[in-house]
């Protein structure tokens, strides 16, 4: 099959059912997208369990364990599709260097408090939902599209969990302060998640191939359109507003911006920085990167390398 | 005018499981329903004792019953009764099969 | 279980009709908090390994198991508030509410090794299930109903645990690793059923609140678990149990 024939099929709205109906270029692009998706779901499990240590009740701890179970299941779906495309998934998941994981930098900043946990449900799972929903609506790859039906239902529970807890905490003056502190760094962090602005990134191929339907800036707008009203409803301050003239959401802070990862604070006074600086920070990975990947890999490594016997 | 059991059932038909588009009635979670004056009493079981959505389901049920005209108080009780796939209604099974989860 | 809690000031509500025997009541309170705390910390320990099972299927299963263990604890704690005694231990929510924990010593700290997870899944979890089974026809409805649902959920935990024992036992090194953990946990688990003829359990039995005595439960556990371990080349001989180090109130080895 030639690139032209493939693009024609996709334009006609036909789904690609396997590598034999696509070109190498398509499959390579698909694999990259699946790795990002699988890694993101996977890393959220140890990240959330870390924050759950501060869950206020047994019920809330169980809810986070349930959410982590869903995320692991979603990761499993993406990796299974990769395995069907000939990727050695065991090596990919359990033997990869932590720095080579492709999840967003946001998850490399450790979640410590319960407020951060519920804002992660409210913000990060919402970002994941925006991205997956776009793939679900627009993906040309049949096996993934079908698998995403279940994923979307479950992510819906995670979002509601975050929203309900944010509402509860916003009703108590002390807890509201903790919530605001979490939102202060996590809001901009989620905006960064959607990646380079459209002015710097060409989406032509990805969209033509049906890897996604919307551009980074469009997805950022989609996220803002529900995340900002959620915060406003509970009188939580966020640096963004809706601009009637341009009919779009406007970010009221320097973006992108320098981030102090130890203090979890954005350096708004330092003004806007270049995306190259952001890409450098992403490439270095963040403080929790090794810890979280070790949480995933430790059982496999102990089992396969008989580490305990040696210890 | 006081509410009837039918009113309560109609309200619960609109309460979905947080993860699936299936009502708590079709999921087989509602194990008892009673109305006495302005008080509704409901006994719920969950698909497992470790159900992560337990609180959310109980709150959704409470909110839905409080919205019924004539109901001022709702008592939600956990039934601790076993739940199996046989407790799903035919409608629930069809919906879940379509989603590829049952 | 233990009747050694002092100051058993009774505040019997009118509708409390489970038992009027002081020793049985004290043992019942102890039984509930011991089961709940062990489920609580077993669930917490497993959940710490939740993303770290040696395969993705394993990780998903551990997540489900952790939720159910914690769910069993969640179901039991409210019973403590029904007890017609003052000074009953309170429920755990975060895990640090009270100094005194009523769980096995092997559940007290996070596990560093995968073999510890597997050993606990094949020893501790089945031991707790034996006790839940012994409550099957307890003359206390609220406890019996909760206890009755536990063994059916545990079937999946057991299937998973046996699979992981086989994974480890497949190689000499893996088997040796698991053996070391079993040697460490097994004496405490066997002692957990209590010394022969323990007065608290005898009182519970006399009141129809439990259907087996200490030795019967211990024997049921051995029959349930030992053959499977031996088939996989694991040794289950234990020498004399260190009863001198046994804390009968918190039911753990010190």
Image (spheres, rainbow, N blue to C red):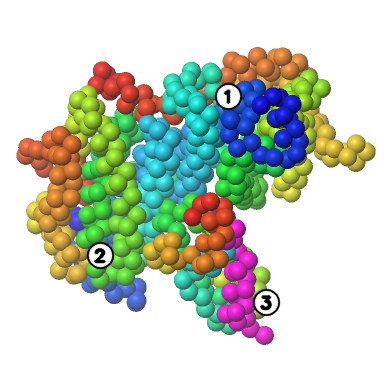
* Disc assigned to residue C229: none
Q: Residue furthest left?
A: C240
Q: Chain of mark 2?
A: C
Marks 1 and 3, how far apart at CA:
52 Å
Q: Element type at marker 1?
A: loop
Above or below B42: residue C129 = above
Crowding at dot 3, Cα within 10 Å, few <14 / some 14-19 / many 20+, comes out as some
Residue A135 placement: quadrant: top right
Q: Chain of mark 1?
A: A
> Residue B21: percent from the left, percent from the top?
60, 58
Quadrant assignment for the N terminus of chain A: top right
Q: Element type at marker 3?
A: loop
Residue C139 lies within the magenta run: no
Circle 3 residue = B69
Circle 1 residue = A102
- Residue at figure coordinates x 9%, y 57% from the top left: C197
Circle 2 residue = C136
- Residue at figure coordinates x 35%, y 58% from the top left: C76
Crowding at dot 1, Cα within 10 Å, few <14 / some 14-19 / many 20+, comes out as many
Which residue is at the front of the view, B98 or A158? Answer: B98
Circle nearer the viewer, 1 or 2: 1
Bounds of the magenta segment: B1-22
């Amino acid at each position: 099959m030639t690139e032209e024939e493939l693009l024609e099929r996709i334009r006609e709205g036909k789904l690609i059912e396997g590598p034999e109906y696509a070109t190498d270029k398509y499959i390579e692009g698909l694999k990259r997208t699946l790795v990002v998706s699988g890694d993101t779901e996977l890393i959220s499990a140890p990240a959330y369990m870390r924050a759950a240590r501060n869950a206020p009740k047994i019920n809330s701890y169980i809810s986070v364990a349930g959410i982590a179970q869903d995320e692991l299941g979603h990761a499993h779906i993406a990796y299974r599709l990769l395995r069907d495309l000939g990727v050695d998934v065991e090596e990919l998941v359990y033997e990869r260097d932590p720095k080579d994981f492709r999840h967003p930098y946001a998850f490399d900043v450790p979640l410590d408090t319960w407020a951060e946990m519920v804002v992660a449900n409210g913000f990060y799972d919402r970002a994941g939902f925006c991205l997956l929903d776009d793939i679900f609506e627009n993906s040309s790859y049949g096996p993934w599209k079908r698998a995403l039906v279940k994923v979307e239902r479950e992510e819906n529970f995670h979002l509601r969990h975050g929203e309900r807890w944010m509402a509860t905490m916003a009703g108590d003056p002390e807890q509201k302060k903790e919530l605001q502190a979490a939102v202060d760094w996590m809001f901009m962090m989620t905006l960064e998640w959607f990646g380079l602005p459209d002015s710097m990134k060409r989406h032509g191929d990805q969209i033509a191939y049906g890897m996604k339907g919307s551009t980074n800036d469009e997805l950022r707008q989609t996220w803002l359109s529900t995340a900002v009203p959620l915060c406003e409803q509970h009188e939580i301050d966020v640096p963004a507003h809706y601009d009637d003239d341009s009919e779009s959401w406007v970010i009221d802070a320097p973006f992108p911006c320098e981030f102090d990862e130890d203090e979890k604070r954005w350096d708004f006074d330092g003004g806007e920085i270049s995306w190259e600086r952001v890409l450098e920070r992403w490439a270095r990975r963040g403080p929790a990167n090794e810890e979280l990947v070790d949480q995933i890999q430790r059982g496999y490594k102990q089992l396969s390398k008989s580490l305990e016997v040696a210890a | 005018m006081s509410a009837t059991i039918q009113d309560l059932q109609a309200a619960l038909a609109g309460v979905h499981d947080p993860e699936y588009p299936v009502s708590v009635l079709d999921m087989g979670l509602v194990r008892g329903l009673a109305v006495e004056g302005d008080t509704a009493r409901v006994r719920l079981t969950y698909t497992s004792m470790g159900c992560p959505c337990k609180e959310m389901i109980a709150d959704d049920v409470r909110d839905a019953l409080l919205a019924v005209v004539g109901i001022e108080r709702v008592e939600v009780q956990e039934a601790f009764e076993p739940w199996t796939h046989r407790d799903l209604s035919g409608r629930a099974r069809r919906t879940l099969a379509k989603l590829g989860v049952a | 279980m233990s009747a050694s809690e002092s100051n058993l000031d009774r505040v019997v509500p009118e509708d409390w009709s489970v038992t009027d025997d002081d020793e049985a009541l004290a043992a019942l309170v102890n039984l509930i908090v011991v089961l709940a705390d062990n489920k609580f910390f077993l669930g917490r320990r497993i959940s710490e390994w939740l993303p770290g099972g040696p395969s993705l299927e394993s990780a998903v299963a551990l997540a489900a198991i952790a939720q159910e263990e914690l769910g069993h604890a969640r179901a039991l704690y409210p019973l403590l508030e029904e007890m017609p005694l003052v000074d009953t231990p309170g429920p755990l929510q975060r895990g640090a509410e009270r100094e005194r924990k009523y769980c096995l010593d092997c559940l007290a700290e996070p596990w560093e090794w995968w073999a510890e997870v597997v050993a606990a899944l094949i020893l501790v979890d089945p031991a707790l299930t034996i006790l839940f089974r012994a409550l099957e026809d307890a003359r206390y409805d609220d406890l019996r109903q909760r206890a009755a649902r536990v063994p059916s959920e545990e079937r999946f935990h057991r299937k998973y645990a046996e699979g992981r024992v086989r994974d480890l036992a497949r190689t000499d090194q893996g088997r040796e690793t698991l053996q070391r953990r079993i040697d460490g946990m097994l004496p405490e688990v066997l002692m957990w059923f209590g010394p022969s003829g323990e007065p608290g359990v005898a009182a519970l039995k006399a009141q129809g609140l439990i259907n087996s005595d200490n030795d019967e439960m211990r024997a049921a556990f051995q029959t349930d678990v030992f053959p499977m371990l031996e088939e996989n080349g694991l040794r289950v001989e234990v020498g004399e149990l260190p009863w001198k180090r046994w804390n009968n109130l918190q039911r753990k080895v010190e």
